[in-house]
Amino acid sequence: MCNYYFRNAECFVNGHLVKASVTVIDGRIDSVNTPNTHDLPEKDLAGLLLLPGFIDPHTHGGYGIDCNSASADDFIRLCGEFAKTGTTAWLCSVSADTKERTIHALREAAEAIRRGCTGAELLGIHLEGPFLARDYHATFDAENIFPADPELLKIYQREAGGHIRSITIAPEIPGAIELIGICHELGIAVMLGHSGATWQETVDAAEAGAMGITHLGNAMRPLHHREPGILGAALDLAVYMEVICDGVHLHPAFVRLAFRTQGSGGLLLITDSMMATGLPDGAYVLGTREVTVCGGISRRDDGKLAGSTLTMERAFQNLAAFTEAPLEDLIPCSSRNAAHLLGIDSKKGAIEAGHDADLIALDKDLRIREVFCRGHLIER
Ligand SMILES: [Zn+2]
């Protein structure tokens, strides 16, 4: 169980696609390009690409489940569903909500992590709020946007059993810079977003340790040539930029622009998916708000976009189509960069000895053909 010898695939190794064999023992990558000396079951992946599994650091759910109201069982079900489209690790995004509902979601997610499963690994929680700019609350209820409150964040992290791994903060709210320092002490990566910040406010937050920008271009002040704002700073600074690559949240030309400015090491492919992902059009909820999904696009009744119905598989296909960049440059955007953001790049995000055997095999059209989560073959 969880032992394989993969051969004949074009593997992504050390930044290049090369024909290589991969030995997996007990759910870990044991070696790359060595003979099958352990006599492991062989899998011939001729004609396929073998890549590190997708890591989705920002999703609100799918398959009828919303992360704000999910039970531990629901989170574990999502691990199984997400794995089918190539996600091998993920963060559940809990959006700005009442304190009681937030704590409930954090406890349930922590319980799911404690139980574990054989699907996509739930790495932790992304808190999208509540310390955001009121003018950019987007899909969230304005009454659930709170001033910077280190004590509340400490309570949340305690209730989550330490599993909050990232948070979205608006850098311009009073106390944001101090809060970024506290996030560091709590082991939480800081993303900037839901914000009308100026260029300088964004630079100050990045210098204080913020590492990335939440869903670039969405729920933030637009770019202006005399005040580039948070969006201009995102393109200029050495920070990660989340992109929702569905062709709706960002124009394909803007995805190209973002890729050209930040390159292979700068983009984070996310889904920002909501509960309708994997289900037909209809009426759903995102966090506390009712939304309607039509043609796969999720909107509030005022027409504003409200999450996506993307899968990582589709997002990766779109990124390739929009940028027309070499695949070798795109693969880190769906794996290694998120692993680095979360400080787990010594065990996830690459095909390397010692890493978890989170592996996906894709055909030349970038359709998923096989998925392995920590060496477990996922039934699809
Ligand atoms: Zn979100």
Image (cartoon, rainbow, N blue to C red):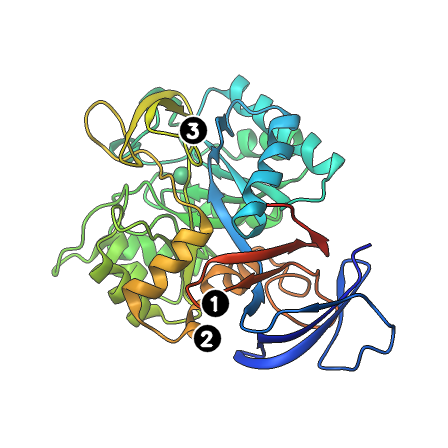
Label at residue 234? none
Image height of 223 relative to 49, above or below: above
Helix, strand or loop at mark 1: helix
Amino acid residing under circle 3: Ala
Query: Which quadrant of the structure image shows residue 52?
Result: bottom right
| Nearer to the camera, 227 or 44 | 44
Q: Of the residues under marks 2 and 3, which one precedes in the sequence?
A: 3
Mark 1 Cα within 10 Å, few/some/many (few <14, many 20+)? many
Q: Are marks 2 and 1 in contact (CB under 8 Å)?
A: yes
On the image, the x and y values in percent for residue 127 come to 49, 37
Q: Which residue is disc 1 drawn over?
A: 331
Q: Quadrant of the N terminus?
A: bottom right
Amino acid residing under circle 1: Ile
Mark 2 Cα within 10 Å, few/some/many (few <14, many 20+)? some
On the image, the x and y values in percent for residue 50 come to 58, 68
Residue at 32% of width from left, 54% of height from top? 202
Q: Quadrant of the C terminus?
A: top right
| Nearer to the camera, 153 or 8 | 8
Amino acid residing under circle 2: Glu
On the image, the x and y values in percent for residue 176 come to 41, 43
Q: Which residue is disc 2 drawn over?
A: 328
Image height of 57 relative to 283, above or below: below
Q: Which residue is disc 3 drawn over?
A: 96
On the image, the x and y values in percent for residue 33 come to 71, 81
